[in-house]
Image (cartoon, grey):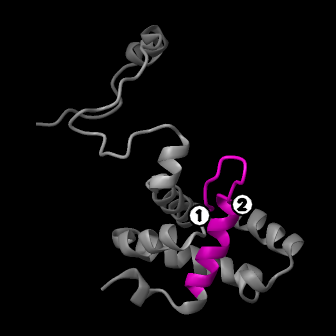
Amino acid sequence: MSATNQLTAAQRDDLRTIAAMIVPASEEYKVPGADDPAVQADMLATLGRDTALVVQALDHLARLAGKPLASLDPARREAVAQEFRASGGGAAATLVRVVLQCYYRDDRVLRSLGLELRAPFPKGYTLEQGDWSLLDPVKARPPSLRRAT
């Protein structure tokens, strides 16, 4: 069952509204917002195991708003979003992660970042070498996890 069938119309509207607040469209970079129909379709198609937490986050958002988020004036919508960030917990973090992962999969966004439209593997991407000595304090710590047997 797809997420389209698991989310109510009101939840899908709130998802689109909060997604636009998380990543608005940019004329400067010529990229859509996360409320773009293609990005939204990707979110709904790939929600999978995150569906329950996203529904929980959307329900919490609806309780805070008292009515559909899209129907609020911009100032009230922003106040609800601030309260949501403070009180949404893991469900809110999952919602934000879902929005961002789908947004940054969009071909238009990848092009604007100068990235090739391809999977990262098998060619991979080259990363500049960093300062590996920054990990020395972590390496010096005693082990905190038990060893697998």
Q: Residue at x 69, y 60 (%)?
A: 24
Residue 106, horizontal then vertical, whole percent: 46, 57
The answer to if 80 sits in the magenta stretch is no
Q: Earlier in the sequence, mark 1 or mark 2?
A: 1
Residue occupied by mark 1:
34
Q: Quadrant of residue 69?
A: bottom right
Disc 1 crowd rating (10 Å Cα; few below 14, some 14-19, many 20+) is: many
Q: Residue at x 66, y 47 (%)?
A: 29
Front-most of residues 2 and 52 = 2
The answer to if 25 sits in the magenta stretch is yes
Front-most of residues 11 and 110 = 110
Q: Which residues are magenta?
A: 11-34
- Report how far apart the C-alphas of labels 1 and 2 lie in the structure: 21 Å
Residue 40, horizontal then vertical, whole percent: 51, 72
Q: Is residue 29 above or below residue 14?
A: above
Element assignment for label 1: loop
Front-most of residues 141 and 59 = 59
Residue occupied by mark 2:
86
Q: Residue at x 76, y 87 (%)?
A: 66
Looking at the rendered structure, the kind of residue marked 1 is Ala
Q: Is residue 128 above or below residue 73?
A: above
Element assignment for label 2: helix
